[in-house]
Image (spheres, grey):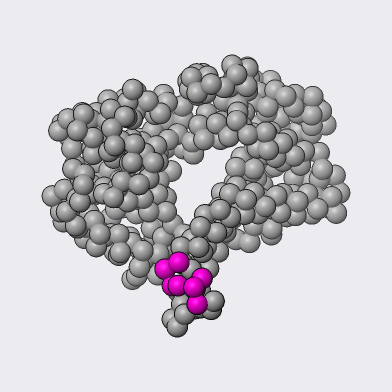
Amino acid sequence: MSVFDSLVGQEKVVEELRAAVAGQGMTHAWLFTGPPGSGRSTAGRAFAAALQCERGGCGACTACRTTLGGTHPDVTVVDPPGAHHLVDNIRSVVAHSALAPSQGRWQVVIVEDADRLEGTDLQWRPANALLKSLEEPTPRTVWMLCAPTLSDVLPTIRSRCHHVMLRTPPIDAVAELLRRQGVDPAMAAFAARVSQGHIGRARRLATDEATRIRRAEVLRLPNQVGDLASALTSAANLVEAADDEARAATSSDFDRERGEWEQAMGAGTVGRVPRGGAAVLKDLEKAQHRRLRRTTNDVLDLALQDVLSFYRDVLTLQLRTEAPIVNVDLERDIAQIADRSTAASTLRRIDAVLAARTAIGNSAAPLLAVEAMAVALRTG
């Protein structure tokens, strides 16, 4: 058993990280890049656990279990609350990173979505708050940044980090991982294929019927854009479903945070909000709203990736390539659209889906972006 067991299809990366844990090539700043689902965050957490572990990542000790479980006091994970990291959050983490480890061997900071460090204000962007710590780290501090590609990260940041590139895991390897976790072989093969190697997505598809139902509903969209009214209705339904899923995913955390606020402020005992508590509550609600919006966008992006895979299959049939289609359960629908359209129109539809993903990633209103996409799918 090892903390690196969850890094599927990343043998070279695991070898490099094991060597660093053993003291060969260890440095204070790491940048993990790779496509969605490749395991960037998983690599960061596994590496952090191995650094804290006396046995180099056994997977069974307290250091390994608390790091992987998110409760180790010397491992901090920083997520952007919205479209970008906030300067104040990064400054707070930088200050914490300078402290000596309280229980572990290292003070480790994992920064998710490091491509969102740029911000909008060049003078006060979050990356500037991080630079000095990367340039002059304390002896027992390790930074781990995660981003889709090297070019997504500011040059001033990436030049100070050791780059580790992950690949999309092979579909067979993802299926094997699911089988080892107790998933039926047929379901494991289906989930690995339609997720196109995205491990987290494959696991949800394999274990959650609601996720499979939502995927089926999303993939009806190409057949529901026959006229303008239908296209706009389909777009609204898609965004509403993403919002519902995001609210379901975050509601328990939000309730817990509200309960912790009430306990800390004594609101439950006095029956009213204490002096000064209203401002704290307002800040909490703002942070939760940003996280909800980001989660909604993430869920929506996964749905758009499903739509993209549908049109990729259509194009595969139209070009008569030897590549297997991804959505074999929808082969009839795919073949019908392939027969009644051209490869050129399919490419325009693929461009429309990519444009919607880009627009949402750049903080455009999701409904407007998806409506524009749906109309383009109709006319493409």
The total of numbered circles placed on residues is 0
Which corner quadrant of the image does residue 214 belong to? top right
Q: Give the residue displayed 64% in from the left and 26% down from the top.
A: 326
Q: Name the spot of residue 113 as percent of width and height, x first.
A: 42, 50
Which region shows up in magenta? 263-270
Membership of 147 in magenta stretch: no
Question: Is 45 situated left or right of 260 in this image?
Answer: left
Q: Give the residue displayed 46% in from the left and 37% down from the top.
A: 35
Q: Name the spot of residue 266 as percent of width and height, x first.
A: 45, 72
Residue 24 appears in view: yes
Question: Is 18 situated left or right of 66 in this image?
Answer: left
Question: Is 35 situated left or right of 189 in this image?
Answer: left
Q: Name the spot of residue 329 as percent of width and height, x first.
A: 72, 24
Vertical side of 183 occupied by 165: above or below: below
Q: Name the spot of residue 240 as percent of width and height, x first.
A: 71, 54
Q: Give the residue displayed 21% in from the left and 44% down from the top.
A: 104
Which corner quadrant of the image does residue 55 belong to? top left
